[in-house]
Every structure is written in structure tokens, then in C-alpha cells.
């Protein structure tokens, strides 16, 4: 059986594969021999989409997704959702800092 290149990473893939074994790029329709069909594009550029944002399901290439910390561990987010996550992290740090300051003031006044 002849292998065909993956549309995302160009590593050889089986024509019957549902996704690339190297990069995980999904193939909606199975790849036909000598014809690679790219079905999904990144929301921000013209690259093939290999992942999607956990929050808004925006399809993205590797370049436009970033890893962020959440209470569930590391998650992949698009730029827009990543910015929101960063803003909430800053608010959480400020609230914790204020609680610690108030606690220290109460303990110092005793």
C-alpha cells in the first residue's frame, strides 16, 4: 500500500488512517491515494487545523493554540480564550493577595 503525505506535517500516512500518527491531524474523509484533502483550516491563518480550543471549539493550527493552566490541568486555548483565561488568573491572584494582606493586618492588630 502506498503512503500519502499528511496535509499538516507532511509525514507519510496510510490512506485508510483517520488521523496522522505523527501530529494527530484528523482526516474527516479518508485520504485517497495520490490525493490529500485538507478539510479544516485554522481560524486565524490558512494552515490546516489540527486541534481545537477547549472553550469555544475554534479550529486551529499548532501555532495559534497555547497551553494554559486551569483547575483541571493544562488546556489548549485559542488566542481569544487564552486572553480571557489570563485575565481571570490575574484577578484571582489579586484577590488572594488582598485576602492575605487583610489577614496579616488582622493578626498584627491583636
Image: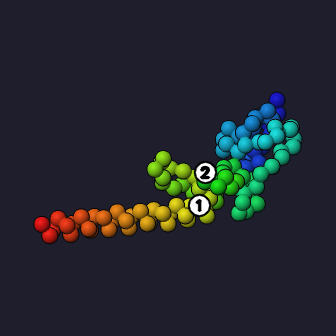
Up the image or down, 41 lies above or below 19; here it is below
Residue in the picture at 67% in, 42% down: 24
**x and y percentages locating residue 97 in the rendered image:** 33, 66
Rendered position, 71 above or below 110: above
Please name the residue that numbered disc 2 is placed on.
Answer: 54
User: Picture quarter containing residue 79?
Assistant: bottom right
Q: Secondary structure at mark 1?
A: helix
Which dot marks residue 81?
Answer: 1
Q: What is the CA distance from the residue labelled 2 to the residue labelled 1?
A: 9 Å
Question: Where 30 sits versus 84, above or below?
Answer: above
Percent from the top left, x then y, of residue 22?
A: 66, 41
**What residue is rendered at 56% in x and 61% in y?**
82
Label 1, residues with CA under 10 Å away: few <14, some 14-19, many ≥20 = some
Q: Residue at point 81% right, 37% down?
A: 30
Residue 77: percent from left, percent from top:
59, 56
Labels 2 and 1: the sequence-earlier one: 2
Q: Is residue 41 left or right of residue 22?
A: right
Q: Residue at x 66, y 49 (%)?
A: 51
Work out which residue is located at the far top of the displayed protein and give it: 1
Q: Residue furthest left?
A: 110
Left/right placement of residue 24 relative to residue 16 reads: left
Query: In the rendered view of the protein, which quadrant contains the C terminus?
Result: bottom left
- Numbered label attached to residue 39: none
Q: Quadrant of the N terminus?
A: top right
Image check: 90 left or right of 5? left
Q: Position of residue 99 (x, y in %)?
A: 30, 64
Amino acid at each position: 500500500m502506498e503512503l500519502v503525505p499528511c496535509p499538516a506535517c507532511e509525514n507519510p500516512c496510510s490512506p485508510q488512517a483517520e488521523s496522522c500518527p505523527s501530529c494527530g491531524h484528523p482526516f474527516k474523509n479518508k485520504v485517497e491515494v495520490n490525493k490529500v484533502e485538507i478539510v479544516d483550516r485554522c481560524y486565524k491563518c490558512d494552515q490546516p487545523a489540527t486541534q481545537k480550543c477547549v472553550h469555544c471549539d475554534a479550529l486551529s493550527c499548532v501555532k495559534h493554540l497555547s497551553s494554559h493552566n486551569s483547575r483541571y490541568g493544562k488546556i489548549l486555548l485559542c488566542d481569544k480564550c487564552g486572553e480571557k483565561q489570563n485575565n481571570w488568573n490575574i484577578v484571582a491572584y489579586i484577590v488572594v493577595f488582598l485576602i492575605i494582606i487583610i489577614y496579616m493586618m488582622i493578626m498584627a492588630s491583636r
